[in-house]
């Protein structure tokens, strides 16, 4: 699974994903298409889908059935079934993270025949009758079926079908047909792997494009042609098969090479099957390299892209990024409108083969946004299959929305969890935790029982830990008595420190607290590979129901987590606490019976179904959360004892209030700092850097586009210290993107020669200073010059750092005069990213 763009490699959360360029998605090219009504009550319930399925074909931009009626395909992916992705079943580790590796381990330990038995056991349990029934209950009418080439081809005898080649594809088609669903056959992993990601079957392998293992690229491409010819021969007359997805995310080559290769593959398949729709996969850079399909004698085709707003660098998880995407941006020409224009010009249908609109958004809002996403796509006749139906985890539970429409039920152990992979920048109540949220639970058993409430935090992968917690409370239902000692902190009373792997610094009296915290807070800090925390014993009664709440924030942590458990055993130093309801095995050493037990459990684990998602997908009417009120106008700013804002109320009776945003960055809306019912707001306090303000109108769940910004005067910041690249005072040609560098935040990207950034700084004394620049480049660049009021101070060439997010610090020396000055970073060439500069005394 994943989405599209250049620039970055795998996401830290082991999802094997690259990012989607903001320029690609939100391009401001003109469009003749009117923005669809955001308050449309049209349903994405499939139209033109009779009790008996008929062969689908294309008509302009529509998917149509045999009668020529439009069919709106709304479905999901059956990921991790016929091609394993280990994060989807709680088994992802550095040692084993792709199917090739697992099969190799099984071959070495148990032999090929036993490997095949284990893989059959896994597949027979991952998707069963109850899953097909769940899919029908969610209202799905199509499933995208990702599979690996060696499900069909005998890997030991190339160009030879396995004896059981068609077992699982036939099974899936039969189960889908019995429930009135179509199937899209998706070659997720081709022979040789069509990209370096683990979801091609073999991580760090790109033989399909580069050749490998002593064979040229043409060898793997020919085997893929052979494979598809056999698939097409078998299913050419099957009316349940909606389309052939020739190659998933084949981004290990250029867009032009991809288009040429897929065009050849199309014609080979079309020679065998004149009936089915053939899907042309987009590149991470888009679909433009194909040109018009008809110009290449390609008919009955659809284009495919994968869109993940709020994830993998495409903004942040939240309402705003989905609003911008689905309602075409403030100008009405970007987002889905820009893509509708492309597809209309090509007169070709569209498949959004992967998207994920509910994770981390809370169950209710995530469900509404998901339904609105399907409905918006349906307005354009786009087919859409989310990623993904089923995702299991070691701890289980939906939290504020996990990736699965269903996941496994949590145990009592893990109560609360958030991490920077799911929701960097979290600052919330426990009941809104993005990983796991358990505001209420019932204790199993009978009588008084001793548990240990454990606060655990840590960081890995070169990250940093800095989290705060406050106002922890554990209460018997109906009681006001907090069973926790010193849940408000201020001292170490009641708490015992515990270390799992590496020491954590603990401050019980911190003034860095969650937004709604009060007084002292608990602050846990540490560097990478930190893991530990503190605990206290509590006595709970079996059969009784308890409420648990509190606050926590990540304070800008990177590759970090915070978790709270109820453990039945007292924590011991050197022993981790996981609260796992699903074990994570070491496949190199795990006994055969443990592997069998794990695989068998996948078919019987009790599901935690995303019930609000199911409800909204089956609702008769669409949600109204994108029925936007007008944008406030006339925003003005005066400074007198604070920054005083005022604006004009739009003429809309639905408006219930206004949300105010503040940012140090001109191009960013920033963070919400307050809500009011009137049309004035005062931001108190002294501005230590330039501040930009915007205002949105609120109407129930709907939030208008932000107003035009107003800003304070430039403020000179101390020159000594770190200046984050995005906190410029002025710029030209700059674009921002989320960085994976330590410390998080945003970096400057997509730089061209002539772009520049200004920083207003105050230098304490004249002299020579050390300066460090944090940069990244995929191929190296002539870089930039640093100017002081147009006078050159330094020239920096950027080395090849190995990738757009592989960061390197370059050091130099500069001479600075005392006083307030403007530093300008002036790009001499493009091809580099910039995250910060740091000035210090020699």
Image (spheres, rainbow, N blue to C red):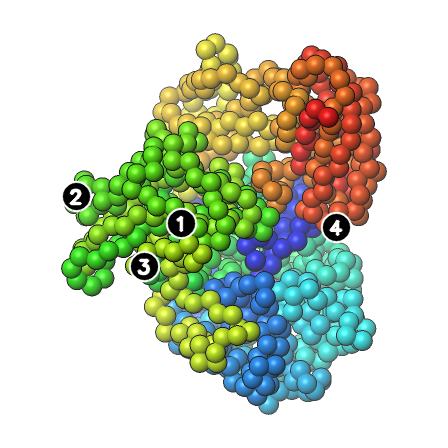
Q: Give the residue pinned by disc 4.
A: 802
**Depth order, front residue of 169/414:** 414
Q: Quadrant of residue 756?
A: top right
At mark 4, the secondary structure is loop
Residue at x-position 21% and y-position 57%: 449
User: Label 2 vs label 3: CA separation?
Assistant: 26 Å
Mark nearest the camera among 4 and 3 is 3
Instruction: Sort mark 3 into few (<14), some (14-19) or many (20+) by Cα contacts within 10 Å.
Output: few
Residue 810, relative to residue 790: is it above or below? below
User: Label 1 vs label 4: CA separation?
Assistant: 39 Å
Q: Give the residue pinned by disc 3.
A: 569
Quarter of the rendering occupied by the C terminus: top right
Residue 484, relative to residue 595: is it above or below? above
Q: How many marks?
A: 4
Residue at x-position 16% and y-position 45%: 478
Residue at x-position 57% and y-position 27%: 664
Q: Give the residue pinned by disc 1.
A: 498
Instruction: Sort mark 4 into few (<14), some (14-19) or many (20+) by Cα contacts within 10 Å.
Output: some
């Amino acid at each position: 699974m994943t989405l599209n763009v250049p620039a970055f490699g795998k996401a830290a959360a082991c999802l094997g994903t690259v990012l989607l360029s903001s320029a690609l998605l939100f391009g401001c090219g003109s469009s003749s298409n009117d923005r669809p009504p955001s308050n449309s009550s049209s349903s994405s319930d499939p139209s033109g889908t009779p009790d008996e399925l008929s062969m689908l074909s294309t008509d302009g931009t529509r998917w149509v059935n045999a009668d020529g009626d439009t069919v709106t395909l709304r479905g999901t992916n059956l990921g991790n079934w016929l091609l394993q992705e280990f994060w989807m079943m709680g088994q992802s580790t550095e040692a084993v993270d792709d199917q090739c590796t697992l099969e190799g381990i099984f071959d070495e330990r148990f032999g090929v025949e036993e490997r095949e038995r284990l893989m059959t056991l896994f597949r027979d349990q991952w998707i069963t009758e109850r899953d097909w029934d769940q899919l029908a209950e969610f209202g799905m009418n199509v499933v995208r079926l990702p599979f690996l080439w060696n499900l069909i081809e005998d890997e030991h005898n190339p160009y030879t079908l396995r004896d059981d080649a068609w077992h699982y594809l036939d099974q899936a088609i039969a189960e889908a047909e019995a429930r009135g669903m179509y199937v899209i056959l998706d070659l997720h992993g081709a022979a040789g792997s069509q990209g370096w990601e683990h979801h091609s079957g073999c991580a760090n392998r790109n033989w399909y494009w580069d050749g490998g293992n002593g064979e040229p690229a043409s060898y793997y491409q020919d085997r893929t042609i052979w494979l598809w010819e056999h698939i097409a021969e078998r299913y050419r007359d099957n009316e349940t098969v909606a389309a052939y997805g020739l190659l998933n995310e084949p981004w290990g080559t250029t867009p032009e090479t991809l288009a040429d290769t897929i065009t050849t593959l199309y014609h080979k398949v079309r020679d065998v099957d004149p009936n089915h729709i053939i899907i042309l996969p987009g590149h991470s850079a888009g679909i433009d390299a194909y040109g018009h399909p008809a110009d290449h004698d390609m008919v009955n085709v659809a284009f495919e892209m994968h869109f993940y707003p709020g994830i993998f660098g495409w903004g942040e998880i939240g309402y705003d990024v989905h609003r911008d995407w689905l309602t075409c941006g403030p100008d009405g020409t970007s987002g889905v409108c820009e893509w509708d224009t492309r597809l209309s010009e090509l007169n070709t249908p569209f498949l959004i083969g992967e998207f994920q609109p509910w994770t981390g958004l809370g169950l209710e809002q995530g469900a509404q946004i998901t339904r609105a996403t399907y409905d918006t796509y349906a307005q354009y006749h786009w087919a859409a299959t989310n990623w993904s139906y089923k995702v299991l985890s070691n701890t289980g539970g939906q939290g504020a929305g996990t990736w699965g429409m269903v996941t496994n039920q949590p145990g009592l152990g893990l109560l609360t969890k958030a991490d920077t992979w799911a929701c960097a920048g979290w600052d919330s109540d426990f009941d809104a935790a993005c990983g796991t949220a358990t505001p209420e639970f019932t204790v199993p058993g009978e009588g008084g029982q001793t548990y240990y409430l454990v606060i655990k935090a840590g960081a890995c992968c070169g990250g940093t830990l800095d989290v705060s917690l406050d106002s922890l409370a554990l209460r018997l239902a109906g009681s006001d008595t907090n069973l926790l000692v010193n849940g408000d902190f201020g001292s170490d009373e009641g708490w015992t420190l515990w270390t799992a792997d590496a020491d954590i610094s603990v401050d019980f009296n911190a003034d860095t607290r969650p937004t709604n915290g009060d007084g002292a807070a608990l602050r846990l800090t540490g560097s990478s590979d930190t893991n530990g925390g503190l605990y206290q014993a509590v006595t709970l009664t079996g059969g009784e129901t308890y409420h648990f709440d509190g606050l926590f924030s990540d304070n800008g942590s990177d590759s970090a987590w915070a978790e709270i458990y109820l453990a039945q055993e007292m924590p011991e130093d050197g022993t981790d606490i996981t609260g796992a309801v699903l074990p994570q095995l070491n496949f190199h050493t795990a006994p055969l019976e443990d592997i069998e037990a794990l695989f068998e459990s996948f078919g019987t684990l009790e599901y935690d179904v995303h019930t609000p998602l199911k409800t909204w997908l089956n609702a008769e009417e669409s949600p109204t959360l994108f029925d936007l009120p007008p944008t406030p106008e006339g925003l003005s700013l005066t400074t007198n004892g604070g920054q005083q804002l005022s604006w004009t109320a739009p003429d809309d009776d639905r408006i219930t209030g206004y949300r105010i945003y503040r940012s140090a960055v001109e191009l960013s809306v920033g963070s919400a700092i307050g809500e009011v019912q009137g049309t004035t707001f005062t931001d108190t306090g002294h501005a230590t850097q330039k501040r930009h303000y915007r205002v949105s109108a609120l109407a129930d769940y709907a939030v208008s586009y932000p107003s035009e910004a107003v800003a304070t005067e430039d403020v000179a910041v101390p020159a000594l210290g770190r200046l984050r690249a995005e906190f410029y005072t002025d710029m030209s040609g700059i674009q921002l993107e989320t960085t994976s560098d330590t410390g998080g935040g945003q970096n400057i990207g997509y730089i061209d020669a002539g772009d520049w950034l200004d920083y207003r700084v105050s230098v304490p004394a004249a002299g020579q200073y050390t300066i460090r620049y944090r940069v990244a480049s995929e191929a190296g660049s002539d870089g930039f010059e640093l100017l002081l009021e147009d006078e050159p101070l330094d020239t920096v060439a950027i080395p090849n750092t190995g990738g757009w997010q592989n960061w390197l610090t370059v050091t130099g020396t500069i001479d600075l005069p005392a006083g307030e000055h403007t530093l300008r970073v002036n790009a001499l060439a493009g091809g580099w990213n910039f995250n910060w500069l740091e000035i210090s005394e020699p």
